Amino acid sequence: MITMKDIIREGHPSLTSVAQEVTLPPSKEDKEILSSLLEYVKNSQDPELSAQYGLRPGIGLAAPQINVLKRMIAVNVRDGERLYSYALFNPKIISHSIEKAFLTSGEGCLSVDRNVPGFVPRYARVTVKGWDVDGNEVKIRLKGLAAIVFQHEIDHLNGVMFYDHIDHEHPFEPIPDAIPIER
């Protein structure tokens, strides 16, 4: 089981490195890592388990955040009535809107122990393709909060941190024609 001590923090070189593709069909070890990423995110959202194991609540986690430079992400986020719970190998954004969106509260990260204020421009809608733990192809159309979370996690696979997108001179400058999303 992944705990907070397994999650590396900003400044670690793996967070700014590009992760390698996972060979498919996935190995037993890769399947275990991918499953453990999703298990962490789910457990971290359970108040009892997060208190018992000292887990910081999260809605997504990427393998580079546990110092595994492979293209794997897990997301467990509720957006309105819908639960988006996915663990994917080699996720890739295959199409996106021109329209942008951002979280009005800004973004956070399990690998960042400080508040980084500012709006993070993201695509309002994305289509993501990847492979599940059994090696089956998955294609998901996302919008709103779920689209933002997937983009955040896929950025980790490319060595990009959420604050790399913030305009540091004007962190709360309105993003033209972007959809503000409350969280």
Image (cartoon, rainbow, N blue to C red):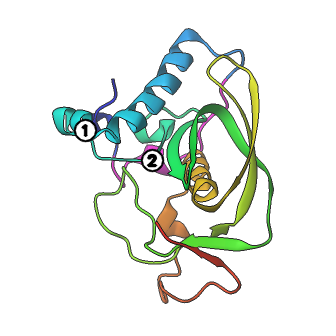
Query: What secondary structure prevails in the magenta region?
Result: loop
Query: Residue, x 50% and y 59% (percent of image)?
Result: 161
Q: Is residue 119 above or below residue 173?
A: above
Residue neighbourhood size for the residue with mark 1, other residues' Cα within 10 Å, grouped as few (<14), some (14–19), many (≥20): some
Name the kind of residue labelled 1 in the image: Ser
Which range of residues does the magenta coloring cover?
Answer: 9-22
Query: Residue, x 18% and y 39% (percent of image)?
Result: 51
Q: Taking 81 as reference, is 177 left or right?
A: right
Horizontal and vertical percent for residue 169?
48, 88
The picture quadrant where one finds residue 102 is bottom right
Q: Is residue 18 magenta?
A: yes
**Residue denoted by label 2:** 59
Q: Secondary structure at mark 2?
A: loop
**Residue denoted by label 1:** 50
Q: Which of the pair 63/131 is nearer the observer?
A: 131
Horizontal and vertical percent for residue 81?
56, 50
Query: Residue, x 31% and y 38% (percent of image)?
Result: 46
